[in-house]
Image: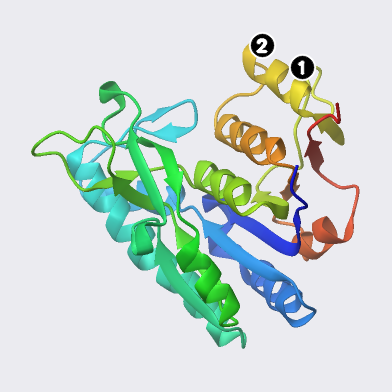
Amino acid sequence: MDRQKKNLVVIKLGGSIIDSKDSAVADILRLSQIGYRVVLVHGGAKLVTRWMADQGVTAEFYQGESITDAKSLSVVTAVLAGLANKETTAALIDAGAKAAGVSGVDGSLIAGRVRDPKLGYLGDVVKVNPQVLEALLDAGFIPVVAPVSLNTEGRKQGDPLLLNINGDTVAGEIAAAMKVEKLVFLTDVDGIRDASGNILTDITTEQVEELLSSGVASGGMIPKLKACLIAAGAGTTCRIVDGRIPHAIIDAIGGSRSGSTITARRR
């Protein structure tokens, strides 16, 4: 396996904590100041749900991911690639960081396909082209990535050019494609729990697969764990931590034992 790119990290800012991101912004700025190259991927499901309600649309979910019809896709694009992305980017700039907001569309970063027509325009990643991220990182910027992506493979006539791909999935695929050192998920839970409700501090990809197949993992934890399987398979160490705790990112990168750490078992 190729050596991981040391000091290159992907941070996934969960939509459940995007409204309280001040500590995360401070941590990301600090990491960039001490030599880390950071790619920030954000969600925004809570914000999307609020906007959809304002439009008279009820958000529907399947295994923690948003079912996305054409009307929902318009709201998702406007909120994630627009408001959520620009507010997050602006917060970093206001704190003194060099940051640039992009989506999975820009630079053909994320090419995808519809997963299942029953789920509408909810997609899976087909290919990651990290060139735009590498260019921004080389220029000293922190890329801030919204997960709205390109609808490329199998697109039918009349279908939109855009897809809604889960932010956790996008973070895992970017981490794997760029062979980053660490992938950190900031969420509103304190880690992965087993069937008895105990926090699993250290967990292998084999154990993750068991949690998924047994149904112990549910809701929004499902796409996170699937993303960890993708990234850990490429050699990346994955952390799932409680982003509500101040300086959770610094602690996770520094080796704190809080939350859960997922690694591939060495063969």
Taking the spot 64% from the left edge, 57% from the top edge, the residue there is 10
Q: Name the amino acid, label 1.
A: Ala
Which residue sits at x=71%, y=77%? Answer: 32
Q: How is the image coloured?
A: rainbow
Spot occupied by residue 226 in the image (x, y as percentages of width and height): 60, 31
Q: Is 255 on the left-hand or right-hand side of 176? A: right
Judging depth in this view, the residue of 204 and 14 nearest the camera is 204
User: Residue 4 at x, y = what percent?
Assistant: 75, 53
Note whether residue 200 is visible.
Answer: no
Of 59 and 235, the residue lying toward us: 235
Residue contact at pointers 1 and 2, CB within 8 angstroms: yes
Q: Amino acid at mark 2?
A: Ser
Disc 1 or 2, which lies upstream in sequence?
1
Q: Which mark is residue 163?
A: none
Residue sticking out furthest to the left: 158
Residue 214: numbered disc: 2
Structural crowding at the residue carrying mark 2, measured as other residues with C-alpha within 10 Å and reported as few (<14), some (14–19) or many (≥20): few
